[in-house]
Amino acid sequence: MTDLEAALRRAVRGEVGFDTTSRALTTMDASNYRRVPLGVVAPRDADDVAAVLEVCREHAVPVVARGGGTSIAGQATGTGVVLDFTRHMNRLVGIDPEARTAVVQPGVVLDRLQDAAAPHGLRFGPDPSTHSRCTLGGMIGNNSCGSHSVAWGTTADSVRELSVLTARGRRLRLGREWSGAPEGLRGLVDGELARLRTGFPDLPRRISGYALDALLPERGADVARSFCGSEGTLGVLTEAVVRLVESPRARALAVLGYADEAGAAEAAAGLLPLGPLTVEGMAVDLVPSTRGLPRGGAWLFVETGGDTEAEARARAEAVVRAADVVDALVVTDPGGQRTLWRIREDASGTATRMPDGSEAWPGWEDCAVPPVRLGGYLRDFRRLLTAHGLRGTPYGHFGDGCIHVRIDFDLLSADGVARFRRFSQELADVVVAHGGSLSGEHGDGQARAELLPRMYGAETVALFERAKAVWDPDDLLNPGMLVRPAPLDANLRFSVLPREPVDVEFGYPSDGGDFSAAVRRCVGVAKCRTTSVSGAGVMCPSFRATGEEAHSTRGRARLLHEMLAGELVTDGWRSTEVRDALDLCLSCKGCRSDCPVEVDMATYKAEFLHHHYAGRRRPAAHYAMGWLPVWLRWTARTRTAPVVNALASVRPLAAVAKRLGGIAREREVPRLAGETFSRWWRRRGGRPTEGGDLVVLWPDTFTEHLSPSVGRAAVRVLEAAGLRVALPPTLRGRAVVGDGTSRSPLALLTARRGQVCCGLTYVSTGQLDRARAVMRRTLDLMAPVLETSAPVVVLEPSCAAALRTDLPELLHDDPRAARLAARVLTFAEALERHAPDWAPPEVNLPAVGQTHCHQHAVLGDAADRRLRESAGLTGELSGGCCGLAGNFGFEAGHYEVSAGCAEDQLLPAVREAPDGAVVLADGFSCRTQLEQLAGVRGRHLAEVLAERLD
């Protein structure tokens, strides 16, 4: 234990982390930069903060304040002690509806403040796209803005008073008329009045530098406002009084289509006199699909408000009439508006990949110019990109002249980094030539601070240095930011990664087979750190259950990054830090769809576990649960299911078995079916009926051995829809599709018997060699099916997802894998595509439950929604993850997190269900979780429909 760590542990009551994991989780924010801290402290209150500052001052160690870690310029990273305010100092102290103010601690997440203010008809004005995870402290530090700044301004416009600790321990209460100003600040300003009145650009999004002009007497000498945007370099915020604004009772969204982004940009300023709440812009190259958008190559999202829906719509229609558009759309439905806004909010992540899949990075994320000059600036910006051979996709706050963009810089090679520097210098000159600010929202940090002399001149930058010395004479707070900055091309987070591809098992087709590139996908926007999910969203259930960064998708990606870097995490694939962080990953695949850049942590976990346990004994659960298909087949062949069920019902015996198998003692062992699905199929004849299209029904392990009633129900429904149902061949050789085996004597003599399996349990436990062998055997068995045009219908969503994604990505060298993956259909998809004229039986009941996380992430549920609607099953299924997640919830040590995940969405939805509601759960894990935690029987959609066929 170092002297610094020991001193901090004695001085503070909050957590002190100098371990590898704590440090690795805070080496990066959402920028291109990386710094390795000495340690992390989570203070409990202002006294703890004061104690940290005192200890660090004595040891001459810098201090960096950190909120959600979503800063894009590098200002939330540092080499000293990081203060994490999200763990304890995250309270909403109070709201005064009459005064329209709120008192908050720095670690409170913006959405929590919005939720508390909403019942009073109020809200906090600024709303960055990271509103579900960014903190008020970070917003104040960066002077954040968001999409509604044309109506409600920046964070500085919403700040009333700030409680601040200086590096030397002084407690200040900052406000107007020099309230709380440190000694020497007023004298500094009085000597530079002329410069402060003339040296700062007058535009709504001027965030760069220190806001010293807020200290002018004619502006109320507002010390609190001047502190905003100082990026933790002047003092440490411990509490804030902020202003709230009245939230419109109704809103409408006008989506205006233009031929190109320049046309949209030039139109934006002309809409401001109409008093919109937002004027956001984006071009077609940022949108994965234009479905639901009006015609055009670029769009303005213009939000209007009113006391009634009619008033909001009328204002939106007035905007449409005033705009010269190619096409337009007005939406008043809140759900429709949320869907459209989600396209814009995810842009900060989706922009990190170009249309061809190549990488793009921040660095020139948020320049701002006067709105009337935005069109000209964008044309100059595009010309500069072309001149440097670069590509980028601008979007952002067109009404404020603020542009976000990710550019395909090559930050891995010396030549690419040199071009990054040259481009940055030239673009800074273009911004200044248009009267703009290098930063219009996210702050300067390391990304732009070096270029501030181009914007302000050397004398004003020297004035910034003098102001910093007044507040922090020891340069203790976030050194290297804003003043005396590190070079913009130093400390790049990519420089520590291996230059040669890492030897891995999966194909990573979207990343050119490069595992490092896959890990680089995480840019730190931290959508995985949201504490609630919207709609059918899933990501990230383990973070919502624990609240720990290490158990978020971003946290795990950061540890994998450090594992590849080899500086902090030094034992590579054998790392216990990475293993422990991945241990609570449910492999729900939610990040594959919900993460804006499609980080696929389930695959990364399987990859890691494969290497981590290579040549070593695995946890018992990997053998008990990973090899589940083998154990269940043996039980079926020996017809000992009744014996196993009887033994499992004897508690002492079950307890011993669970302990030996690494299974949580809280779990009940599911009962095995007395007759497998395949045996029932053979007993009824084993041949398809005559009729329409042939479909091959996949007998997955769970349907086969644990819930064959689902398979029987699916057969009934599919046949009722006029389809011919067959099971896959069970003989390798010249098997006949349609009878589940072959009756050819020659085939019986020459072929080997087997059973298809998707390999899911082996993949989820990282037994990839075994998974590959199982998958190849399956492809051999399915060879006759692949010679036909028959689809493969998979009832278990997790198995369908494994066949769609894991199979072709693990067997990327076998073309049969991609062919089989392309054949996989869900139950609802099969009915919709191959029996389009069939009408399901009428159920006419409300439905509750949960969309399976793998279905949400990989398969999609549009066909299921339409099938439920046709059957009269009303209501929306909840999002999230059931928490059992195959082997995860059964493994020892996971029970509490598993139950916590279920309590997030699924169990509350079921408890609040109306009488007579159908509880839908297509996944065996979901049904098991419902039965064991709530005593509720969930049913597969096939079972519900089959019941009504009677």
Image (spheres, rainbow, N blue to C red):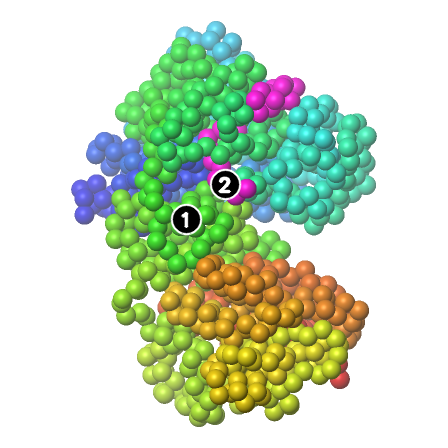
What amino acid type should be assigned to the residue bearing mark 2? Ser
Quadrant housing the C terminus = bottom right
Query: Where does residue 805 sit, x and y in percent of width and height?
Result: 52, 60
- The residue that disc 2 covers is 358
Q: Judge left or right: residue 417 versus residue 867.
A: left
- The verdict on residue 124 being magenta is no
Q: Secondary structure at mark 2?
A: loop
Q: Residues within 10 Å of mark 2 (few under 14, many from 20)?
A: few
What amino acid type should be assigned to the residue bearing mark 1? Asp
Query: Where does residue 861 sit, x and y in percent of width and height?
Result: 64, 61
Q: Residue at x 27, y 67 (%)?
A: 616
Query: Where does residue 759 sit, x and y in percent of width and height?
Result: 46, 70
Q: Looking at the image, is 678 positioned above or below residue 97?
A: below
Q: Are marks 1 and 2 in contact (CB under 8 Å)?
A: no
Q: Residue at x 58, y 56 (%)?
A: 537
Q: Residue at x 55, y 53 (%)?
A: 593
First reached walking from the N terminus: tag 1 or tag 2? 2
- The residue that disc 1 covers is 514
